[in-house]
Image (cartoon, rainbow, N blue to C red):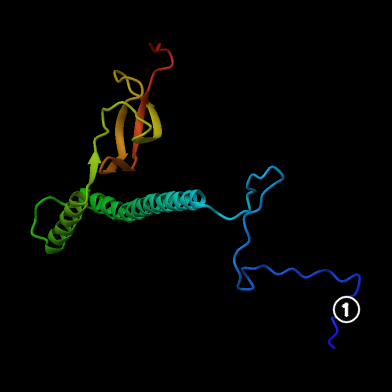
Amino acid sequence: MTRDPVKPPDAPELETRDDEAGGTAAPAAADASGAPVETGAPGPEDYRDRWMRAAAELDNYRRRTLREREEWNHRRTTEIFDDLLRVRDDFERALAHAPEGGDDPVLSGFRLVYRHLVEFCERHGVTPFESAGEPFDPDLHDAILQVRRPGVEPDTVVEVVLPGYRLGERVLRHARVVVSTSDPGETVP
């Protein structure tokens, strides 16, 4: 005679799911009206929505990294050419005080190196832009001084202290210029 195990009165009843026990899955839950109730299991629409979101995030990531890489390249190129332009300025100042002509081999070598530097800059799209006699443009010029010049329109570049350069269409370095101003008694139209 076998005895049935006795269950204590306050012990919770253990539930087993048929699919865990190796049986068939339970039918979908329904509410009192018999309509199916969402059980939280993702359907095909959910998977498609997730896939579309992931694809959009990947596309945004690609565009963002491409833009950041281009910005980094431009910033790095600007830094390199900014340093090279300082060297070019030093060459130009030194050559401005060098005697013309002569057979000095050091001076000839100096001019050759300067010519190579200018060709290198031009080959990579770094070109100077004209400023003298042009109207002052804050996108191109840094005014370091204002002077009164009779017969010259106000806000005109009258002297270039340091030339400006472009890298392609972008301004690499603003020209440092002296700008004309009007006389105190003169009326500005």
Q: Tell me the residue at 86%/84% (across/down).
A: 3
Residue at image mark 1: 6
Q: Position of residue 127 (x, y in %)?
A: 22, 44
- Front position in the image: 134 or 140: 140
Viewer-nearest residue: 56 or 166: 56
**x then y, percent, for residue 185:** 42, 12
Q: Is residue 163 visible?
A: no
Q: Nearer the viewer, residue 74 or 176?
A: 74
Amino acid carrying mark 1 in the image = Val
Task: Classify residue 103 by image quadrant.
Answer: bottom left
The outermost residue toward the bottom is 1
- Location of residue 184 (image quadrant): top left
Query: What's the residue at 84%, 69% (across, down)?
Result: 12
Q: How many marks?
A: 1
Q: With 11 as the anchor, is 112 left or right in this view? A: left
Q: Nearer the viewer, residue 85 or 107?
A: 85
* Left or right, 178 with reference to 99: right
Which quarter of the rendered picture does the N terminus lie within?
Answer: bottom right
Find numbered disc 1 in the image and state the secondary structure of the residue it sits on. Answer: loop
| Side of 56 where 170 appears, left or right | left
**x then y, percent, for residue 86:** 31, 52
